[in-house]
Image (cartoon, rainbow, N blue to C red):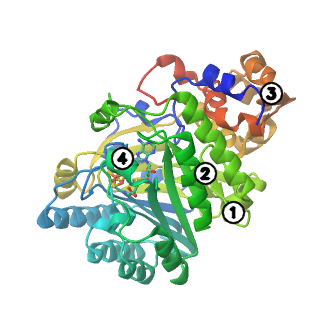
Amino acid sequence: MIKNYRELIKKYNASGPRYTSYPPATFFNENYGNDDYIKSVEKSNHESPRNVSVYVHVPFCPQICHFCGCTTETGFSRPFLERYVDAVMKEIDFVSSKIDRRRNLTQIHWGGGTPNAISYKYIEKITNKIKDNFNLSENYEMAIECNPAHLEFRHIDLLKNYGFNRISIGIQDFRKDVLDAINRRPSKRPIEEIVKKIEDTGFSGTNIDLVYGLPLQTVDSFKETIDKAINLGTDRIVTFSYAHVPSVLPRQKILEDIGFPSSESKATMYENSYDQLTQAGYISIGMDHYSKPEDDFAIALKEKKLHRNFQGYCTRQTTGQVYGFGASSISQLHSAYSQNFKNTMEYIRNIEDNNLSVYRGYSLTHNEKVIRHVINSIMCNYYVDFNEVAEYFDCPLYEIISILEFDSSNFVDFIEDGLMDIHGEKITVHKSGRLFTRNISMKFDPLMSKKIGTYSKTI
Ligand SMILES: C[S@@+](CC[C@H](N)C(=O)[O-])C[C@H]1O[C@@H](n2cnc3c(N)ncnc32)[C@H](O)[C@@H]1O
Ligand code: SF4
């Protein structure tokens, strides 16, 4: 780490998009509806990537954690859950009928909420529906986000039988007092046993999620949490920076009574985690992911072929245009984004009446696709070469430079601070600059000047 790191964190810690999509979801508009989505899906059959990714959202949790930024509800009854599952199946039937069956389904991701807290017969039903309606590729990846408070060994066996090959376990922190503070139940079984069971059952990978910046965490306690995570030896570890946006997520407000670690402590937590994980042999992927060197992510990063979508990072092999199913789910197509209604009842009613439940979306212009490509390249692969971008879009270099309104003087601060370099048409973000990729990306984003939406701090 470079010497004046703490100063730099102070200097650059502004609010900004996470760039899981470009334009960010705050720019999606309600003029985009069901008919637009059908047209976008039909168009997507002729666009790249040709692969199909499917996202299934389960917006239910037995108990809501106060820190949580996801769209989820509690207090659901069995008949309501059944109606939801039927709606998801109906949506899959309708949307998949518009998708070219010759396209390969390479990636299925179940997120939430807590998908592992619903009855497993529903998981099986929806999984079978997906397998029946899409052309599942041989090397597909099927992952599910699981809260270990509800994960039994027999569930792991069932998931394997249904065809899942990756499990992501939300740990957040190993400390009981931190979990109590965020209203989260601890794991049912020791995490070591769960990780071992997943490995023994033949899953190809396990991911664990940790969050830093939560109430009661200290620099030393989070150091211990990272050490424990390293000892688990999973192939991927994610250290999310806690995003506090109580104006958008009122459930988070209650945590202010307990208080948070200072931004300086939070920065040290990031710095320590980076050092601990890289010294233990993990490769840093993007801003918050770490993977073992032999993992697909690390290989893709080395080959500068790492991609990203709302579900996280992905490799070129598994990346597809994403078709989202369920309340609040987002579809990420080449030319458009579409998001379903967030309220589960509203989602169900719309699907029952019209097969679709689009709440808002966004159709991208050519220029926005270029900007998205550049921001993705910086966020995932820490570099961008405008010549390669021109080649990709099959247009002259001057056109790319003009679309990006590229002016090297916008980057002087980053260069003087030793965070990145510009050589000719190529921008390289240094290791010391990785924490600032959101800030660097913001310089390519003309929408920043519109100041629409509330964003978390970049660091
Ligand atoms: C849908 S949630 C997790 C799945 C599962 N329900 C669980 O809790 O284990 C996915 C991940 O998002 C992360 N997350 C949720 N809220 C967050 C926030 N406000 N800031 C940063 N990360 C957050 C957590 O690490 C969580 O494991
Ligand atoms: S963190 Fe997971 S379990 Fe907790 S409320 Fe969010 S989705 Fe539910």
In primary-sequence order, the first of circles 1 and 4 is 4
Task: Please report contact status of discs 3 and 2: CB closer than 8 Å, yes or no.
Answer: no
Looking at the picture, does residue 149 appear above or below residue 65?
Answer: below
Marks 3 and 2, how far apart in space?
23 Å
Would residue 100 be visible to someone looking at this image? no
Q: For the residue marked with disc 4, what is the amino acid? A: Cys
Q: Using the image as rendered, state which of residue 3 and residue 133 is in the foreground.
A: 3
Considering the numbered disc 3 on the image, is that residue within a helix, a strand or a loop? loop
Q: For the residue marked with disc 3, what is the amino acid? A: Gly
Looking at the picture, does residue 194 appear above or below residue 158?
Answer: above
Marks 3 and 4, how far apart in space?
35 Å
Considering the numbered disc 1 on the image, is that residue within a helix, a strand or a loop? loop
Considering the numbered disc 2 on the image, is that residue within a helix, a strand or a loop? strand
Residue 413: quarter of image: top right
Mark 4: is the Cβ under 8 angstroms from ligand 1? yes
| Residue 262 coordinates in the image, percent (x, y) | 50, 29
Label 1: which residue?
292
In primary-sequence order, the first of circles 3 and 4 is 4
- Can you say which quadrant of the picture contains the C terminus? top right
In primary-sequence order, the first of circles 3 and 1 is 1
Q: Would residue 173 be found to the left or right of residue 372 on screen?
A: left
Outermost residue toward the right in this view: 424
| Tally of numbered tags | 4
Label 4: which residue?
70
Considering the numbered disc 4 on the image, is that residue within a helix, a strand or a loop? loop
Label 3: which residue?
418
| Residue 103 coordinates in the image, percent (x, y) | 53, 67
Marks 3 and 1, how far apart in space?
27 Å
Question: What is the number of the mark on residue 289?
Answer: 2
Marks 1 and 2, how far apart in space?
10 Å
In primary-sequence order, the first of circles 3 and 2 is 2
